[in-house]
Amino acid sequence: RSSEMDEENIKFDAACRELADATQALIALKKAKADKKEIDVAKKAVKKQEKAVDKLKKEQKALKDELEGLMLRRFFVVPSFEIYGGVAGLYDFGPPGSALKDQFLDFWRRHFVIYEDMLEITSVCVTPYKVLETSGHVAKFADFMVKDVKEGNCFRADKLLEQHIDKVIESGAVSKEKRAELLTIKAKADAYTAQELGEQLKVLKIKAPGTGNELTEPFPFNLMFSTQIGPSGHSPGFLRPETAQSIFVNFKRLLDYNRDRMPFAAAQIGLAFRNEISPRAGLLRVREFLQAEIEHFVNPNDKSHVRYDEIKGIDAWLFPRELQEGEGKSVKMTFGEAVDKKIIDNQTLAYFLARTQLFLHACGIDPLKLRFRQHLKDEMAHYAADCWDAEVFLRGYKWVEVAGHADRSAYDLKVHMAASNKDLQARAKLDTPKIIDVVEAAPVMKKMGKALGGGAKVVKKYLTEMKKEAVASLEKDLSTAGQAKLTIDGKEYTITSEMVEIKKYQKKESTYPYIPSVIEPSFGVGRIIYSILDNCLEVKGKGKDKRTLLNIPAVIAPIKAGIFTVTSKEGLKEIADGVRKSLVEEGLAVQQDISSTTIGRKYAKSDEVGIPFGIAIDDDSKTDKCVTIRDRNSWKQARVPIVDVPDTIRRLCRMKMTFEELIKKYGEFKA
């Protein structure tokens, strides 16, 4: 195989470039009024390259259609409410799709949560307005939309721009210089302001798809689904657009649970909701989706990672922002090199990029179709230190983001701390202890209880959490007026100087407080599942001999083994039932087929849904107490004692044994 990155894309882009060169050469000859023979030769060259581009497009489209037809036919994923015509951006997972998702999440938990000692939580989907106002989602969680001025159809402006540029480049009707300019515009599309997007749409004369009508100016459309919490109408909320905020607001409890040890990571798998403008790409752009997110909390002054040495020598394809202008290509380097050269900001971010790469490779993503693209400076939030997207090359869609990795600095905890008036700080040890001045407001509960009744506990909690500056202000009010008014959760309380004692003293401090930074890997589960299916799809033969295989790795395969009888002879069903029972008792999902269908047809059906191993039971199984285990990918077989089957399949599925090692142990069986 080629050692170059994204070889399918390179092949297609090379054909497009050759078409552009041939087209420009023809235009130049016509302008120069060249000889007719020269022009005819140039025309033939253009037609030849047009055919080459068209052929590659058709090949990719055929495989994309094959996959999407398979997903629908075998009930991996189908449109929700299909009998009513479906709803754009909403999909249901059928039995194999649900099983694949569950196996994927189980592996994700083992790879990240268990291996990294993360703290996993599960939180609600409905989020109060205040939380998402504080996080910035109410004001800024939007995409720019344009409308067909006559039909009213809605489109996402940056996607229209990107798709138009792809079509222009694929047509070959632009010079090398213009192509580089268009690719730079495409790279920046997601970061443009509404005004910049509008200007590009006008300059490139982009019209409404399907109608050719004029488009409105781009305007922001907030992607959150709004709702009301309770019947009063006084408590607005949203369906959460991400799972992260629940982790941030629970930070103090997580820190307490972790016995105040830093750094640590929290994780959550859960639904998120985004009211996408025009979801037209299957599982790649949906309105309800599953996220698997990690929030790794670190000291802003120390973003090293204890296991960095494990990953620093791993090679990766990186697409730094400096290479994204024009014809930029990914570069291959180790994660250690990238950190040393300050391409990746810090060790912890690099560590999670590497762990993500190892995970995606194990899930079946082709190493030559996975890259990490760094966000452009104006694409990142103002508070972010560095951001990288894991992108997978998909047939018919090109490069698609499947997991984001962001160093969000201390922004999230800082804003929630300010808005809630709750301490969301961690503490680190000082090199040298120091003496500090302490000012506290100590409640006199005997007096306060008499005066405030049930409100005394509320005021006590408020006073004990007061910061030094607030205590000084309270002391001033009490000394001048003899009383002070406190507003707590919208209710006003009056306290007198008898109810509170202002204490001033010095104490030795061995630690200092800080607001942790957050490094966030965020995985779009639906997108990754589609990417796995795309990367694992293989079509062999044509016509009657055509066979479709899903080479899904055993570790995440929805069904681990197929149990097949070779004939319908007496006694084989009982053996098959016994093998099935031994496997399901190990928690291994299986599919059993004891019909009279030929064994070859049974294998073909199981290959199509990604079953990695076939267990064939024949007449000899009655006497030798063995079965034949077949490997889907290599079609190699081994004869294995029935008593060894459960442990063998479990080890193969947990990546504790390869099929080659199985053959070494039992020998290769050839029927």
Image: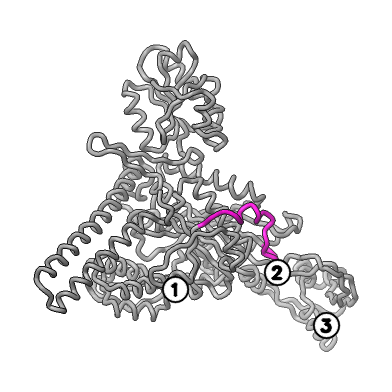
Viewer-closest of 559 and 487: 559
Q: Which numbered disc, 3 or 1, marks the residue closer to the eye? A: 1
Q: Which residue is mark 3?
A: 475
**Looking at the image, is 191 positioned above or below residue 17?**
below
> Start and end of the magenta stretch?
298-316
**Three-letter code, disc 2:** Asn
As drawn, which residue projects farthest toward the bottom?
A: 480
Observer able to see residue 253: no
Q: Nearer the viewer, mark 1 or mark 2?
A: 2
Please report the residue visible at 87 percent of the width from the left and 69 percent of the height from the top.
Answer: 446
Q: Which element type, helix, strand or loop, lies under badge 3?
A: helix
Q: Position of residue 54 (x, y in %)?
A: 23, 57
Residue pointed to by mark 2: 301
Tag 1 residue: 191
Secondary element under disc 2, as helix, strand or loop, is loop
Residue 96 % position (x, y): 42, 40
Give how far across and how far down residue 516 sits, in percent: 68, 66
Q: Is residue 370 above or below residue 146?
A: above
Residue 623 is a magenta residue: no
Q: Is residue 287 left or right of residue 163?
A: right
